[in-house]
Image (cartoon, coloured by chain):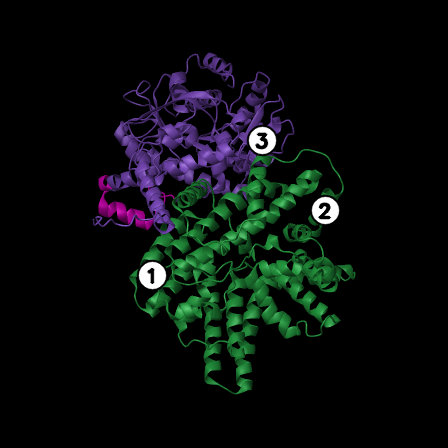
Chain colours: A purple, B green
Amino acid sequence: MELPETKPRRRLSLGHLLPSLMLFFLVLDLVFRFVPLDPLTFRAWEAMLRRYPNAQGPFTPGKHYHRDNSYGGVASIGNLPAFRHYHSVDFTTDAEGFHNPPALAQRHPAGVVVGDSFTAASELPEDQSLPAQLTRLSGAYFYNAGSPQPLRLSSLQALVRREGLRHGLVIYQFLESHAIDKPPAATPDGGRGWGQTFFLRRVGATWADRLRTPLNQLHDSPLQGLSIKLQKLLQNDVFLPNSFANFVIPEHLRNGQPILFLPAEFKTPGDASQAAARWAAYFSWYSGELKKDGLDFVVLLVPNRTTIYGTLLAQPRDVSSSRASLDELARNLERRSVPAVNLAPPFARDASVLLDRNTYLYLLDDTHWSACGTAVAAARILSEIAAHKDMLQLPTTGLGEKVLDTLSCSPGPAR
Amino acid sequence: MLFNSLIFLFAFLPVVYLGFWRLRGKNQRYIWLTIASYIFYGTWNYKFCALMAFSTAVSYLAGLGMLRWNDPHRRKLCLVVPVTVDLLLLGFFKYFNFALSSFADVAGWLHRPVHPPALSIILPVGISFYTFHTITYMVDAYRGVIRPTRNFWEFSCYVSLFSQLVAGPIVRFRQVEADLENLDHADRKRWLDLGWSFFAIGMMKKVLIADTIAAVITPAWNNPAHLSTMAAWFCVLGYAYQIYFDFSGYSDMAVGLGYLFGIRLPQNFNSPYKALNISDFWRRWHISLSTCLRDYLYIPLGGNRGAAGWLTYRNLLLTMLLGGLWHGAHWTFVFWGGYHGALLCLYKLFGDLWDRLPALLQRAATFFLVLLGWVFFRADSFGVAAIMFRHMFVWSAGSVFPGLAGLLVALAIAAPIAHLAPNTFEIKHEWPGWTVAAIGLGYAVSLIAIAGGQPSPFLYFQF
């Protein structure tokens, strides 16, 4: 009997398996990039930020993020679970993609706070961001326009028009570490590259937004995020040494509390007076442009954590050059008649007093300020505004009591 | 661009591979590989592509000169001028600041301090390797061992081939000439499995073993002052396996890539930690370099023609000192070379006695001697080497270092492979299904490890 002809079984070979495996990883990675990042993130910033921002806000619009066990970015960078201060976070964006929870939003804002991640406040309770504190203390609504980099003039003007802000106040939160950078060009679009300008003119903002949406999706690889998480898990100083710890500087405050810094927080501008002059010129121009629209302008100078806590460490560091650089900028702004609030002196005073009560103006596992810090900052700004009679006057009745109430704030215990 | 980077694995390699096999003509393939190799090289520093192109052009013209002229004087000129140019370039980029600082040190010792300004020179990656490619080509052409090629693209493809451009193996033209000549007839499927097998094994050696060991011992090597005796031995032992798995892993990947493009590259490691004596070690370790040093330095110096006379010892020492210097512009490398040269001389003197020892003892003793040498090779300075030796041989108690568990696991895998298992050129690469699946799993784990961190450079890239 003749047996039916059988095909020889195909042998599993490396020449086919390994390229197929790579193709599989590639496809898997592409697919995963369209899956929301939320479950992989430990805080709102990574989950909500658009890497290719659309014409309006920097975050995904109309989205809510919640996490029960969020913790600071520096503890995450250093892969140091023992340094984490767990807390719950909520982060809600408005239709424009800014951090403005609907519960706090009002129709006509009295002012807009422009700034970076300190203003956006992804690590604080939603009612404790700087704009929310300003709203609470003054009773007038302040719009949160915080984004990774403070808004350029043209973006701000567009926002002001959209929000119907007339004769209001613009607060520009400026972090000390930005003094190292050059200010943007004194043009409405901040010297945007010719390619980008050409692209926007040709394509139009709407289509540019549409094109950027898939780019945002493709930017972050959850698969890569998972591999990093796995590496961090293995690098626990038992199985493998924690190489991530090299990216942070652990210190102790004089009350014994551990605090983590990033090396970048210790950087100061090489030539402080030149940097101050450049930024003061930029703010003067920015202020002048806003004046044409009937808007008042205040610069809020925010010191780095190191500037405030450097001298309060168990082994104090010399931060005189950091303080001097902010003072220099404040003097330059004064010379140019640009109203400014320098938070360095009051923060240094308050931080020292609060330290004895185990209360901090900044987070211990993150570069940003705490709810206490935003409250003090808000109170200082409102006092400054009250002192400027030609500025928009806000109700400040009982402000002194509110500030005292603010200073009694205390952070939750570390879990 | 590193072999163990995502950009290489998921973009460069697939594009170059698919493009290469789409092309049919020999010249098309030479040009394609040359362009790809220059892009690969340019990702480090595009400015140095011009340097490699210059070196290639000079050597190619020298080859043409040797083809054209039979007059010994002219032929000699075709050898001496380009070799001098190559060596001057290598000397300037690799050794200029070293020579300057050594001169300043000597002047300081003689109480005549000088402060020559050091130039800001960036060492072009792979210059030691491609310079050897061009020099061996010209010397072989001069000796009549090879017939220089008239095809510029074939020659530029040989010099710049990305698989062995930055860290070897140092391939001689005669070793790849036949495959380059038949590049248009290469069969894609013939060596596909073999190529991937070499590549995957090399990748696992590098990413899973060498990098794991490095993650634990590198912080300790960078700060050796407070190491305990046990920690110091773990550091040295770890480095012995790290460098072997790193460099042999790279060589395996290079050989694998060569196979994928139809070019057979020579073996660079033949289980060196199985060596019975130091002479045997150098026949097994970085074979392409040691044979180059033998053929182009030791033998021209006179080799061992003086039987066991002092000239043989001088030649050995000189060759090994220069071999040490080739690794880097640092006196610790020169000392390491001298140490191995001295061991080779001692073996020449007492080899008869050594060979009478039991084989196991010979292997263990050879490994121990090599291990001691690695201290000078790895140490950033003689001070660090001295600290390490003190901790190794003068008891100091204390803890080990973070990550000991990972190191022990890696060593438990590395040691049997290095001392007992057959090497990649000894195995047949005809894997049963379950082994293919296991290699696939190991390769996938390597990819995950690569995706989770910055790719770590291969140790021999610095040379």
Q: Earlier in the sequence, mark 1 or mark 2?
A: 1
Q: Which residue is mark 2?
A: B389
B183 vs B399: above or below:
below
Q: Could you say whether the residue bearing mark 1 is in a helix, strand or loop?
A: helix
Residue B53 lies in the magenta stretch: no
Q: Residues within 10 Å of mark 3 (few under 14, many from 20)?
A: some
* Neighbourhood count class around disc 2 (C-alpha, 10 Å): few under 14, some 14–19, many 20 upward: some
Whether residue A187 appears in magenta in the rendering, the answer is yes
Residue at 31% x, 18% y is A103
Q: Nearer the viewer, residue B243 or A355?
A: B243
Residue A250 circle label: 3
Highlighted magenta segment, given as a residue range: A186-207
The percent position of residue A71, horizontal first and vertical second, equals 46, 25
* Mark 3: secondary structure: strand
Q: How many labels, in total?
A: 3
Looking at the image, which is closer to me, B432 or B153? B432
Report which residue position mark 1 lands on: B20
Q: Quadrant of residue B345?
A: bottom right
Which of label 2 and label 3 is nearer to you? 2
User: In this picture, is B198 found above or below B77?
Assistant: above
What whole-number distance in Å separates the C-alpha atoms at marks 1 and 2?
Answer: 51 Å
Label 3: chain letter: A
Q: Position of residue B20 (x, y in %)?
A: 33, 61
**Mark 3 belongs to which amino acid?**
Pro
